[in-house]
Amino acid sequence: MSCDFLAQAVAGVQKLSPYVPGKPVDELARELGLAVDSIVKLASNENPLGPSQKALAAIQAELPELTRYPDGNGFVLKQALANKFALALEQITLGNGSNDILELVARAFLAPGLNAVFSQHAFAVYPLATQAVGAEGRSVPAKDWGHDLPAMLAACDANTRVIFIANPNNPTGTWFDQAALEAFLDQVPEHILVVLDEAYTEYSAAGELPNGLDYLSRYPNLLVSRTFSKAYGLAALRIGYAASSPVVADVLNRVRQPFNANSLALAAAAAALTDDAYLERSRVLNDQGMQQLTAGFAEHGLNWIASRGNFIAVDVQRDAGPVYQALLREGVIVRPVAGYGMPQHLRVSIGLPEENQRFLEALRKVLAA
Ligand SMILES: Cc1ncc(COP(=O)(O)O)c(C=O)c1O
């Protein structure tokens, strides 16, 4: 007799639906018999520029050391972050992607009987990480696709331990300004940890969005999470970080795997931090791509949600599932977001100009069919 291991899993895990990532290029190539280089993938908010040369050189230099465990404390990267952002080393937690940070928060601060608050249409990992540890996830209705911060405050109670907010949010691209963030932080009870997810913050020019790091000294219950996966172009390496009070960092460190950030990632991320020219190129390319896509949508008579990320959600005015499938047959991979409560939208990552063009042409063809 075989055991039903699903029934053996802890309650929160039994009911989980796994995160659905963007479809890999190789998978579509296999399924449709297409050449890999004929496929355009605009599905995972990746940087279309390819990695920074400085990061590649740092990886090359690190390769002979692959037999060694990484520095479990990530000293070199922490030092680079501390210097760049005027942080103390004790404020920094490194993660295997910023996803890891979100999970560390859930493991350290949430449990059955406790709850986390997040917005409708917010990044999928907030409910997943919350549910996996048996805590209650409270999804608060969005306002104009964005976070309704006052309503999120009102949803908190004595058992709330974490509020997840994303600025900008994925997949909507919506954002909130400095005044809204400050008014919110002023009112959050001090026992609640506010996780301000700034995965896409580098796509905004200085001053366009509030900088979460500026608020850390004023609000000890604030944690800012960031990543090297997006504007820094290192998604495959899985490296992100949190800045928080030293006490919160110490708590996260207790549940962190000892070697959660690998040597190549540590070296590449430290080098990427020094490549301001690459970061600026990424931002400018993204701005141009955003204009190209929105101009194309306007021509097609489609609405979109204004975005500060490296992606945009477009309303295809019908069930987006078949549109997504038809785009796949054209060799274009985008992201359906029905799972986020957005059944008529597709999320499109900003690519190179020619990739954006391929997508717009394929979309025109598919919508006309
Ligand atoms: C809002 C947001 N936060 C966090 C992440 C996690 O990214 P990573 O684990 O690659 O740092 C993503 C990735 O898509 C995201 O969109």
Image (tube, rainbow, N blue to C red):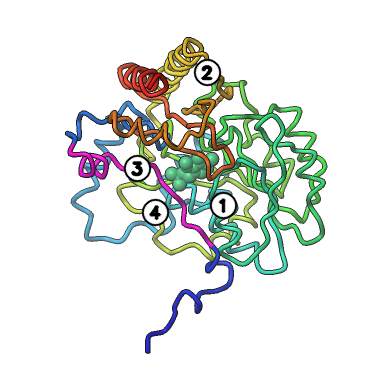
Q: Position of residue 255 (x, y in %)?
A: 53, 65
For disc 1, the marked residue is 90
Residue 22 within the magenta-colored segment of the rendering? yes
Q: What is the secondary structure assignment of the residue under circle 1?
A: helix
Rounded to the nearest angstrom, the CA distance separating label 3 from label 4 is 25 Å
Q: Is residue 240 visible?
A: no
Label 4, ligand 1: CB separation under 8 Å = no
- Residues at marks 1 and 2, CA–CA distance in whole angstroms: 48 Å
As drawn, is 177 to the left or to the right of 295? right
Identify the residue at image location x=26%, y=41%. 28
Marks 4 and 1: in contact by CB < 8 Å?
no
Crowd band around label 1 with a 10 angstrom C-alpha radius: few (<14), some (14–19), many (20+): some
**Where does label 2 land, which residue?**
302
Badge nearest the viewer, 2 or 3: 2
Residue of label 4: 261
Q: CA distance from mark 2 to mark 4?
A: 42 Å
Looking at the image, residue 4 sits to the left or right of residue 182; the answer is left
Mark nearer the N terminus (1 vs 4)? 1
Nearest-to-viewer mark from 3 and 4: 3
The amino acid at mark 1 is: Glu
- First in sequence, mark 2 or 4: give its number: 4
Q: Which of the two discs, 3 and 1, sits closer to the camera?
A: 3
> Residue at (82%, 42%) from the top-left corner?
187
The residue type indicated by label 3 comes to Lys
* Residue 23 - label: 3
> Would you place residue 335 above or below residue 315 in this image?
below
